């Protein structure tokens, strides 16, 4: 018998004994070759126990199109014969799936290492690493525990509502709207992210466009292309806004920076900004014009429940 993290262990107890069928998710391996024993989180109790499978046990493997290079997985149809010759499933470029990318990003945003996040989610660190690094399909129970550990929802981890505007959740019964001071605003702006800049475009019409930004020495900087709408910010006073909405808890915050914007022309400064940038512009294309906003006003608000 061989298994991988995330596979299911099924105990088929003979009907004559009167005991019920039992199953659980394999969340820990003790041997590199996937042989028993296993750490199993049982679906009926949500408890993890060390299991040495008997003759009434079988492994049900997850259905995946890819596995890490060198790993072998028996076809689902042969799951009852896990000791049999295993078929190699061809692999292409193996990387994390969408769920794994969201889990990893949220974990880093919360400042958690894998060991701490796994502890909070009550799963083995190796299993969490597997979820983040491979195109995994975790069980619903694993998603529920991860969502609770990372302060989000199962729907968010699965990408639900990605095509919908945020803020469709119900309002809090007792909301508390609190003004943020300048230090709190700077902390929320952090070092980089995606924000929106409000400008007057070349045709005189108002426009708001999203940009990838960096915070460098208290200045908000972003790069764009000449003659783009965002480039209209140069040598004018603009408003820049960034926010975050927690859809599951109906709370969030927003920060508004207002100040003059100018083009960064010094070649050394431009090279330094390009080197320290955390990401390239999501919009793609050649965008080498850096614009710097030096806020003269920095305000913000946070909405939470009054009893928190």
Image (cartoon, rainbow, N blue to C red):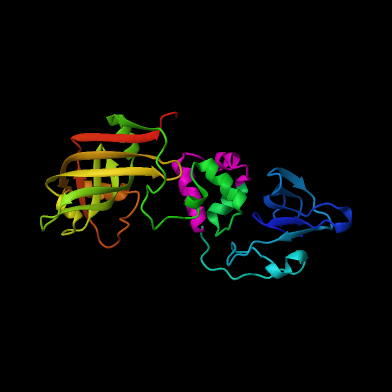
Can I make out residue 18 in this image?
yes
Quadrant of the rendered structure where residue 139 is?
A: bottom right
Quadrant of the rendered structure where residue 137 is?
A: bottom right
9 above or below 237? below
Can I make out residue 267 in this image?
no
How many numbered callouts? 0
Is residue 168 found left or right of 144 in the rendered image? left
Task: Give the quarter of the figure containing the C terminus.
Answer: top left
Between 274 and 290, the residue placed more toward the observer is 290
Q: Residue at x 69, y 54 (%)?
A: 32
Task: Give the quarter of the figure containing the N terminus.
Answer: bottom right
Q: Residue at x 31, y 40 (%)?
A: 254
Residue 124 highlighted magenta (yes or no) = yes
Q: Residue at x 39, y 41 (%)?
A: 171
Q: Position of residue 282 (x, y in %)?
A: 32, 57
Residue 284 highlighted magenta (yes or no) = no
160 above or below 248? below
Direction front: furthest residue: 173
Between 140 and 105, the residue placed more toward the observer is 140
Q: Position of residue 302 (x, y in %)?
A: 34, 35
Between 61 and 174, the residue placed more toward the observer is 174
Q: Position of residue 15 (x, y in %)?
A: 85, 58
Is residue 129 found left or right of 205 in the rendered image? right
Is residue 146 found left or right of 277 in the rendered image? right
Q: Position of residue 45 (x, y in %)?
A: 71, 44
Is residue 270 found left or right of 1 in the rendered image? left
Magenta-colored span: 97-125
Direction right: furthest residue: 16
Q: Please, what is the dominant secondary structure of the magenta stretch? A: helix
């Amino acid at each position: 018998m061989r298994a991988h993290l995330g596979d299911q262990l099924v105990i088929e107890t003979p009907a004559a004994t009167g005991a019920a069928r039992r199953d659980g998710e394999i969340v820990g391996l003790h041997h590199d070759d996937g042989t028993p024993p296993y750490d199993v989180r049982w679906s009926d109790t949500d408890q993890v126990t060390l299991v040495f499978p008997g003759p009434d046990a079988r492994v049900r493997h997850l259905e995946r199109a890819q596995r890490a290079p060198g790993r072998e997985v028996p076809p689902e149809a042969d799951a009852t014969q896990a000791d049999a010759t295993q078929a190699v499933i061809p692999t292409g470029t193996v990387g994390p799936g969408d769920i794994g990318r969201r889990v990893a990003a949220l974990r880093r945003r919360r400042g958690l290492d894998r060991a701490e996040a796994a502890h909070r989610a009550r799963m083995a660190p190796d299993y969490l690493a597997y979820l983040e690094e491979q195109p995994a399909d975790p069980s619903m129970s694993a998603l529920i525990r991860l969502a609770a550990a990372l302060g989000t929802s199962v729907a968010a981890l699965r990408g639900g509502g990605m095509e919908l505007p945020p803020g469709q959740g119900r309002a809090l019964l007792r909301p508390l709207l609190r003004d943020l001071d300048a230090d709190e605003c700077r902390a929320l702006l952090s070092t980089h992210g995606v924000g929106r800049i409000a400008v007057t475009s070349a045709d005189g019409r108002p426009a708001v466009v999203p940009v990838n930004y960096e915070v460098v020495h208290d200045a908000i900087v972003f790069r764009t292309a000449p003659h783009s709408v965002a480039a209209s910010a140069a040598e004018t006073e603009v408003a820049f806004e960034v926010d975050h909405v927690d859809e599951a808890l109906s709370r969030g915050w927003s920060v508004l920076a207002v100040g003059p914007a100018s083009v960064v022309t010094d070649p050394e400064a431009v090279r330094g900004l390009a080197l320290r940038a955390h990401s390239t512009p999501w919009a793609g294309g050649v965008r080498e014009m850096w614009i710097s906003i030096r806020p003269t006003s920095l305000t913000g608000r946070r909405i939470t429940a009054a009893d928190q």
